[in-house]
Amino acid sequence: MASPITPRCLLLDIEGTTTPIRFVHDTLFGLVREQLVSFLDTEWTRPDVQESIALLRQQAAEDRQRGIDACPAIPDASSASDDTIKQAVVDNVFWQMDDDRKTGSLKRLQGQIWRRAYEAGMVKSAVFDDVVPALHRCQALQVPVYVYSSGSVEAQQLM
């Protein structure tokens, strides 16, 4: 019998590899849909949230300029009330999620919502039973582990 070969590294994705894909799609994406309005209401004045909204606004303008007319525009404070802007953000985020878009601006806001939910104990990650022992084995063998994913770095760290 041949000796097992020690790999030079382990390259993982999160969705479907370490974490059930249903957890991401049902739990995390569902959480964004459930919590977005209250998140915007309570966190509206935070500079990092305003930066995320500015990035969503910029993405929407670029999309519309490229002829994606279905993309909901997000007005700025000089032309609309906070309530109007919040509703436009909700419309834009849900539209992007429905279209399975993976824009940096969307991922950033989703990550902020997920971070708040994790910190509040509203959600706990699901990891396949064999993942932790496999990672411990890699550590013991000094095999580096890398993640390659379309998800945001923050989302990967939370999961």
Image (cartoon, rainbow, N blue to C red):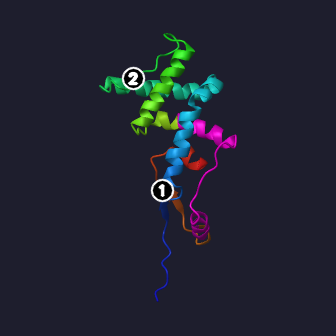
Q: Position of residue 34 (x, y in %)?
A: 57, 34
State whether residue 46 appears in this view: no
Q: Nearer the viewer, residue 142 or 24?
A: 24
Q: Residue furthest bottom?
A: 1
Label 2 sits on residue: 61
Which amino acid does the dot numbered 1 rest on? Answer: Gly
Please tell me the numbered disc located at residue 3: none
Picture layout, residue 19 above or below residue 113 = below
Disc 1 element: loop
Q: State the residue at coordinates (62%, 28%).
A: 38
Q: Is residue 149 above or below residue 135?
A: above
- Report the front residue among 72 and 34: 34
Identify residue for label 1: 16
The magenta segment: 109-138
- Please state if 132 lies on the left or on the right of 26 as rendered: right
> Residue drawn at (50%, 25%), measured in percent from left and top?
89
